Image (cartoon, helix red, strand yellow):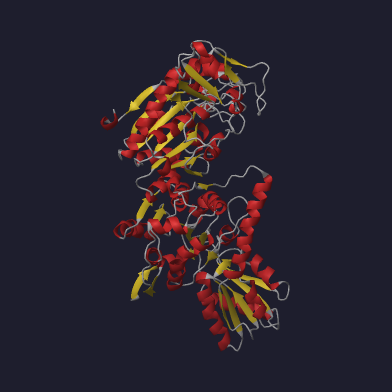
Amino acid sequence: MRTIFEPTKGMLPVDTSYCPGCTHGIAHRLIMECVEEKGRLGDTLGVSPIGCSVVAHEFMNIDMCESAHGRAPAVAAGLRRVHPNHLIFTYQGDGDLASIGAAEIIHAANRGEKFTTFFINNAIYGMTGGQMAPTTLIGQKSTTSVEGRKKEVNGMPLRVSELLATIDGAVFVERVALNSPANIRKAKKAVMKALEVQEKGLGFSFVEFLSACPTNWGYQPVDALKWLTENMIPYYPLGNLRCPEEVK
Amino acid sequence: MSERVLMKGNEAFGEAAIRGGCRYYVGYPITPQNELTEFMSREMTKRGGKFVQAESELASINMAYGIAAAGGNVFVSSASPGIALMQEGLSFICSAELPLVALNVSRGGPGIGGIQPGQADYNQVTRGGGNGDYHIPVFAPASIQESIDILYDAFSLADEWRNPIMILADGMIGQMMEPVTLPEPKAPISEDEIAVRKPWALSGTKKGHRSVVKSLRMQPNDLEKHVEKLFEKYRQAEKELVKYDSDRIEDAEVVFVSFGTTARIVSEVIDMLAEDGIKAGLIRPISLWPFPEEAFSKVNPKTKVVISAELNMGQMMTDVKAAVCGRFPVRLINRTGGIIPTSLEIYERAKKILGEYK
Amino acid sequence: MAKFLVKFNVDKCKGCELCVSVCPKNILAISTTEVNAKGYHPASITDMDSCIGCASCATICPDCVISIYAE
């Protein structure tokens, strides 16, 4: 019997704490599949954020540490100083990365830190119970924007990939979506390239995953992916924004 | 061979740290400790270490957390408002039980305060300015030589206790120059040694087990157990890390309690009082946490008054009163805002206080 | 005769239905009677013979429930 698909050894054989239909599980698996396929489970270090995925270290089968809210890129920069050749990544949500950790991500990118940041954009604060994030869409309801986000009060949703793509040190920037098998396969290719960028020492690499939070959005998982497709992708266009020649 | 040189405090801190085994330094510009960051930017790479200028003190303490989590001997420095920003990270680092050395070259506050020397960070550094139950051993040197001696040992001490070690040096010590003896450089720890001595450090699962550095404990029972374990360590530290100097306290009529720069001025005041026939003594806490309560048991039972002399509004008084435990009246002689009192000023104020306890 | 074998690690399933929604052959279903150890109605395959081995279900599953083998 030939194996077509088996769960990666990069994921521990435990149940995740994520809600049914939450796409954190897909993002975790893609990253760990790539690390396993590169044969680097033994020398990869991950930094988990504050948010639902603070406990990513309970699911990913690698050495990991937690970080204070938004500070994961600073922590990863520290890890990199000690381990110049390991694979190192941060895994961060939109509240963690785009709000409280905006300074850390911008400066890590600007220094061209040789690690990868995986950014989970689900347009809401998940762990704290559905508050408005910097990436919450105009009109999207949250527990701190009950009538929907308003431009004149909260400003426009932040397009982090576009912002980082203006920074010289961020040599690889791509936005992907976890809304369909086809897009998930593309997402995996982006993860592979991002890791190759750091293996080749080319600079900072960044993959933004448009993700679903069915629980806090108030949709069934299948409808949440539909909402993502219809609302998030038009505002957050998919595709590569920066890619060095070496990994094209 | 040890070397005798004339050095500025801020540069001596860096030299002592490197000789003491520091291989990583993270800093952010803030007065009055900038010469240290500048020194480290020049020296670290030359001497096999790494220097990072962070985008903020928040980032620098978290880079240090990453370095410490990976097993590196890391040093961070800042001054009062910058240390305030680092408190978040220090709380995480204490919970995660990571070794780190932090230096506070303190100035006046609150707020941006001023840039002249101060000791108004006493509460900030001894109480743990971050959230939760934790302690950080704090040492307050009174000279550049003493700063060197403390920093030289601080990295192995931090490793041994798996806890940050804080050095509180006021701006005066950072900015002045003194002749000092530099100790022999310690050999840096190799990567193989890190794996053996710090099996908890992140270096990848290829080492044979999985390491996780964390502070989150969602179950109240787990968190309580973790904090109790931390406090077993702190109780041990209270026994083993107490450090102080005392001078003529066994037959003193008046005992001063003073640390850092202020203690040096008070030493002179004791001699001035002696010339008047007044027996004065000094307890100089070197460890501010743990506070050297035991020193107070040696104080002459007939002492009339204990005077806390500080460059703040009397922050150390709380600890002095707890140590004195009602046996003597406790009074304060202080200046704040960056003003350093002369020995004459302290002498005159002490005489006035003594007049009340005839 | 089925060409593929689709295995479900039933007790890991959270019943989110994402696999059901992407199956091009519509041969996956959420059980209406069975309840797994976690208390969810798990997904399962209703017609193994029609499976084309595309792995869309396993690709979108957030919980590493599904393994697929070719006979």
Confirm whether residue B131 shows in the render. yes
User: Residue at the location (54% across, 19% down)?
Assistant: C18
Residue A34 placement: quadrant:
top left
Q: Would residue A238 be found to the left or right of residue B301 on screen?
A: left
Identify whether B226 is placed above or below A196.
below
Rendering coords of residue A232 (x, y %): 48, 20
Residue A171 placement: quadrant:
top left
**What is the residue that sits farthest to the front in this orientation?**
C1
Looking at the picture, tell me which residue is in the foreground, B223 or A203.
B223
Confirm whether residue A145 shows in the render. no
Identify whether B245 is placed above or below B195.
below
Rendering coords of residue B350 (x, y %): 61, 77
Identify whether A220 is placed above or below B341.
above
Residue A196 placement: quadrant:
top left
Q: Quadrant of the C terminus of chain B?
A: bottom right
Looking at the picture, tell me which residue is in the foreground, B134 or B39.
B134
Q: Quadrant of the N terminus of chain B?
A: bottom left
Rendering coords of residue C22 (x, y %): 50, 15
**What is the residue that sits farthest to the left in this orientation?**
A245
User: In the rendered picture of this protein, how many numbered marks are placed on residues?
Assistant: 0
Looking at the picture, tell me which residue is in the foreground, A215 or B187.
B187
Looking at the picture, tell me which residue is in the foreground, B344 or A24.
A24
Rendering coords of residue A242 (x, y %): 32, 28
User: Residue at the location (61% across, 28% down)?
Assistant: C11
